[in-house]
Image (tube, rainbow, N blue to C red):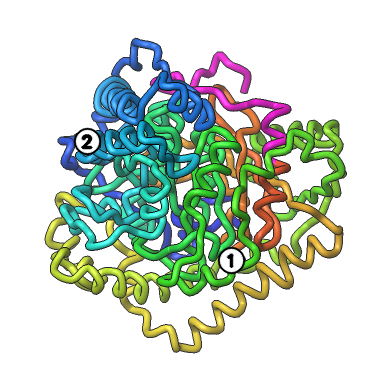
Amino acid sequence: MTRRVRSATKIDRRTLFRYGVAGAGAVAVAGPMARSASAASLSPEAAPDQPFELEEVSIAELRKRLESGQETARSLTEKYTARIEAADRRGPTLRAVLEINPDALAIAETLDQERKAGKTRGPMHGIPILLKDNISTADRMTTSAGSLALEGCTPAADAFVARRLRDGGAVLLGKTNLSEWANFRSTHSSSGWSGRGGQCRNPYALDRNPSGSSSGSGAAAAANCCAAAVGTETDGSIVSPSNNCALVGIKPTLGLVSRSGIIPIAHSQDTAGPMARTVADAAILLTAIAGADPADEVTKGSAGKAKPDYAAFLDPKGLQGARLGVPRKGLFGQSPHADRIVEAALAEMKRLGAIIVDPADIATAGETEKSEFEVLLYEFKADLNAYLAGLGPRAKYHSLSELIDFNQKNRDREMPYFAQEIFEKAQAKGPLTEKAYLDALAKDLRLSRKEGIDKTMDKHKLDALVAPTSGPPSLIDLVNGDYGFGGSSSLPAIAGYPHVTVPAGWVWGLPVGVSFFGRAWSEPTLIRIAFAFEQATRHRQPPRFLPTADLTLEG
């Protein structure tokens, strides 16, 4: 998730750069909110000067307030909309939210009427949720992946994830900013930049990067602009912004959550997932968006493996007797701050009854960098072309080659800081029948699964693996692009296995998370372990919207 990574195992939409390509993508320009593209626009204004009555309020508490009549779906929607105005449009100017759903209040009122009539659709009834702007919605909101090329594009159908939320009674509050094209356009990007939205900023220190590509989902959820948010990940783009924004992020097993209707990078790794302030909220949101989808064949694999309620696994004693492996090779030694925090977390887990197997190295760590990027290039071209073609007349551009041409013709707006090297490399790739692609995919799956995570867990009889999620947030750098420390996202991302991150500590007021990952379909185990750690430590703190890191704090 970070460029110039100091680990051979950290590759994702922000960091596939060591081989001349990779990662990222939002450009700097003013979007529809008239946001400045200049570096001067990063100067922070005052933080919101009034306490926010919904600050750190959980989904469970919101439900209680709705059921008691203390709140309505409309009142919640109004309050979160006002919070977006205060924290995102004015004040700190996070640039985390691209647009608010113009139908949000009408949706909320309909849900209130249903509740008055004695009908509720489930745990999410009346709960305002933000969606990353690569998740299609068939309404008056744009689905653009942050690009000006798709500005105004309104797909004919909801993504399956959006439809699940609507059917479950959630209020789709708006769309979040992101690293343009989910951080897969240039080798010199600043994560969180998009042509439509400009630079998204970290609410803990406004000159720090929120990370990508689900940067807006992370910053908005951290700043209490919604009850929770949905992000997407190919490699690190849920867990890294969750790390940087003191959130719980769940990257699910490939196939637990449908990809249909989501602007893609690569079908072998893409998934949506929850980003929330607590493990409980993330589990509730995961339940809401998971489900088999006839339009996404990979979700057939969830039959008999998906759970009807992931909140059922919230066990405060979940660490007792859990066997946790520590894969030091390649996943530690990248950030001394993150290492220190995770060492303390491991000691706490041991105190809570976990059995720590240390080391439990993954022998194949670092061996999939080149092959992963090769796979992503091939699949990006094929998958994006298919998505764009399916938009028909609702979009002006219907292929990767047309997007490349659009960017060239609009360099002043789309490429003032960095170019589109990844787009060009992907365009040069052939079909998915080519041997180079098939060999790279087979290598990735073998090294990440059978000879990687599975082998290590079998050898040590583990319930989960534990490592730093990433280092503390790095500075926003429009000149050089992303930099920072690596993390632990790549192996579970390539394998298509679940990965959960939880806040674990602080470095000069900047958050650092700890990661739990394991076998396919092990979400219940990971949620149980993550919840027990969270409840015992409670490291999550709301942001103070500081202009820069507070170096008077303990580092």
From the viewer's side, name the closer residue of 25 and 152. Answer: 152
Q: Earlier in the sequence, mark 1 or mark 2?
A: 2
Residue marked by disc 1: 302
Q: Which residues are magenta?
A: 530-555
Of residues 63 and 516, the one nearer the viewer is 63
For the C terminus, give its image quadrant: top right
Left or right: 297 with respect to 9? Answer: left
Work out how far the residue at label 1 is from the one at label 2, CA to CA, in angstroms: 46 Å
- The picture quadrant where one finds residue 256 is bottom right
Residue 440 appears left or right of 158 = right
> Residue 311 is drawn in which quadrant?
top right
Pinpoint residue 50: horizontal percent, then vertical percent. Answer: 35, 11
Residue to which mark 2 is pinned: 38
| Residue pictured at 59% horizontal, 60% vertical | 253
Residue in the image at 85% along x and 31% along y: 351
- Which residue is at 48% across, 74% downward? 297
Q: Is residue 507 visible?
A: yes
Q: Position of residue 417 (x, y in %)?
A: 26, 48
Q: Amino acid at mark 1?
A: Ser
Residue depth check, mark 1 versus mark 2: number of the one nearer the observer: 1
Which residue lies most toward the top here? 50
Dominant secondary structure, magenta:
loop
